[in-house]
Amino acid sequence: MTKPPLTLYLAAPRGFCAGVDRAIKIVEMALEKWGAPVYVRHEIVHNKFVVDGLREMGAVFVEELDECPDDRPVIFSAHGVPKAVPAAAAAREMIYVDATCPLVSKVHIEAQRHSDNGLQMIMIGHAGHPETVGTMGQLPEGEVLLVETVEDVATVSVRDPERLAYVTQTTLSVDDTADIVAALQARFPAIVGPHKEDICYATTNRQEAVKAMAPHCDAMLVVGAPNSSNSKRLVEVGARAGCDYAQLVQRASDIDWRALEGIRSIGITAGASAPEVLINEVMDAFSEHYDVTREVVETAVENVEFKVPRVLRVPA
């Protein structure tokens, strides 16, 4: 039986960003240097496949520092942690390695600088997301106020409307954030913004590739985890950019083939913590069902690389 034809548009850039690459490398190098087990507070990145692979190598994933023994190294996830966490590790004389993405660390430094200048912070982010918790935890309680939507801006209660600054979670939708920033600036004209956009280059680039690809696609799949903020934003961006069917899948086994019946084109992309092996798995699944013609939609070339912490580059 002949397979139906399908044009598969592949977004570029897609998948791993430099911060995720670095975080995974940190766990691998820690295991190499100190042997197993190495403890990791929270998922190092939001991807089950990656976490399971590191677990098999000897990484032990925990939710809180008090689940870790004093005599084994602990790594803090790429999303960042409140200041209290490394302080507690230092008090227990633990070996710890901070795998916080340097672009998240930049937001932490920004928040501290504004606070030192007497400004109260407003953070645009998602309540409960590890990155938001980590950024808000850089400053004392009440110094960082969270807004998630344009509606939140109308009700946020600030200490002094003349002494405000804002930061954002790095993995948000560029368009949604622009609307919230506009609402903040309208209500608080004196509010100070970041020198440079807080939303990271990788998030922006992946969203731009999806916007370029979406109008050509009958359907779009984003390879990523359900707890990955940047992956979920890609689904929303795809739907908003004109793709009627945009869905998140963790692996090829999650594809809903019945929902895709009759399509002539599909767009494939992946969140910043999804490895290329899972993207290839999804593409191979389409090749089994269709006569695939592949086209790459490239909107940017990424060559960013972040160094791992010095403690991992020197011998044990």
Image (cartoon, rainbow, N blue to C red):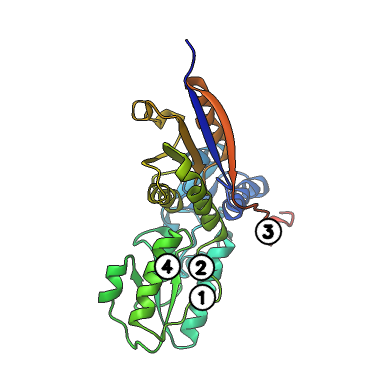
Circles 2 and 4 in contact, beta carbons < 8 Å: no
Q: Is residue 203 above or below residue 196?
A: above
Residue 178 seen by the camera: yes
Mark 1 sits on what residue?
194
Mark 3 sits on what residue?
307
Q: Which mark is residue 19?
A: none
Q: Amino acid at mark 4?
A: Ala
Q: Amino acid at mark 2?
A: Asp
Picture residue at 36% right of the left edge, 41% below the top: 244
Circles 1 and 2 in contact, beta carbons < 8 Å: yes
Q: Earlier in the sequence, mark 1 or mark 3?
A: 1
Mark 2 sits on what residue?
198
Q: Nearer the viewer, mark 3 or mark 2?
A: 2
* Badge 3 element: loop
The picture places residue 253, in percent across and down from the top left corner, at: 42, 28
Q: Amino acid at mark 3?
A: Lys
